[in-house]
Amino acid sequence: MSVSHFSPDERDPLALAPADCGRGHSCQFCPHESTCSLDKPQHEKRLIESRLSQVGQILLVMANKGGVGKSTVSANVAAGLAARGYRVGVADADIHGPNQSRFFGFAGERIRLNKEGLSTQAFTAEGVEHPVRIGSLAFMMETDDTPIVWRDAYKHDFMHHLIGSFDWGPLDFLVIDMPPGTGNELITLADMLEGQDVAALLATTPQEVALMDSLKAVRFCQERSMPLLGAVENMSGVTCPHCSGHFHLFPRAHLAEALAEHDVESLAQIPLSPALASGSDSGRPIVIDAPQGPEAQAFAPVIDACIAHAKAMFAEAAVASLDTLAQGASNQFDAALADLPQEQQDALRGQLADLLRQ
């Protein structure tokens, strides 16, 4: 009998089984992939949706330019959020230069695959209530200097692994350290995260060549209707260790003009600091080790902006949910009041409106 002749009550024996295996990682990591008859695309889709359902605010740290400090900004913003009591993860999307492992002191460490997925490394520090979860390709490389030579298809797959296969658990913030450019990795993530609470931070330095590239990332956010919280100006000044005088290595006027022209707020000016560089190399974000220092204080407005945006998005979602609930309640309320005198109906409706506003 032709497969087209099966009745609706019969399952086509050639169709993939709809049941899920329950594993927390993608099929590519599974030893049973070659013999598995389950619906693999559906499993991958469910896996990503399951991870994202536990994540509050997603922050993409972008620049479109290499070497301007995206990883420094990502690590310190994540650590700063964790220091304020939030559950935070850092996803290292820089395939060709994954270095969040070093920024959090896990250089050379490896991870294991279990039923829940790829394990993340957990950064802990005094005063940090919830460990910062780190996911990076660096944890799967043979050595830290192994080059990654991948075509776009492999990059596309890894972006899905980064979100879906790593066991992030429940998070208030997921900070994604983006690679340079507006290519495959950024497009894949932007498509995958469509409908989630996603916002971007722009990392740049004052040089015109860096600004020229960074403004392309601004255009990307505008064209994708992705909220851009503002710019983090890295290497914006130097304090002399002898006289304590402050001066700028690069002229800043053109940067301020360009940001204003594109309606991008400058959130912070991060100094070019030996202590900041030393903290990155040693795997201890400076906002954790020197919270009262000038570098940590410079990052504070960025962290404030991230928290304020997340709270605003939560409030907006809560209002929308209450509006839907109120509409349903109002319809039922009207039906219940139908037999009462009009004056009494009006009084009760006023009381209900007061309760909903509260």
Image (cartoon, helix red, strand yellow):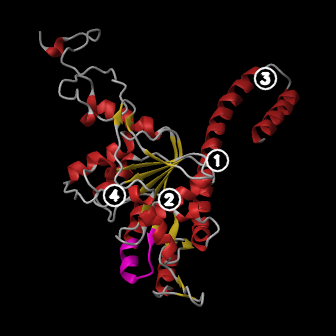
Q: Residue at x 54, y 57 (%)?
A: 79
Helix, strand or loop at mark 2: loop
Q: Position of residue 48 (x, y in %)?
A: 39, 38
For the view shown, which residue lies furthest in the left direction? 1
Q: Nearer the viewer, mark 3 or mark 4?
A: 4
Q: Earlier in the sequence, mark 4 or mark 2?
A: 4
Q: Are marks 3 and 4 in contact (CB under 8 Å)?
A: no
Q: Position of residue 356 (x, y in %)?
A: 75, 37
Q: Nearer the viewer, residue 305 or 241?
A: 241
Helix, strand or loop at mark 4: loop
Q: Nearer the viewer, mark 1 or mark 3?
A: 1
Q: Say what amino acid the circle numbered 3 marks.
A: Leu
Helix, strand or loop at mark 3: helix
> Magenta residues, as a range?
203-214
Asked where in the image residue 344 lies, by quadrant, the reply is top right
Q: Which residue is mark 3?
A: 337
Q: Say what amino acid the circle numbered 4 marks.
A: Pro
* Mark 2 closeness class: few <14, some 14–19, many ≥20 residues within 10 Å: some
Q: Position of residue 94 (x, y in %)?
A: 33, 58
Left or right of 193 on screen, residue 306: right
Q: Nearer the viewer, mark 4 or mark 1?
A: 4
Mark pair 1, 3: CA separation: 31 Å
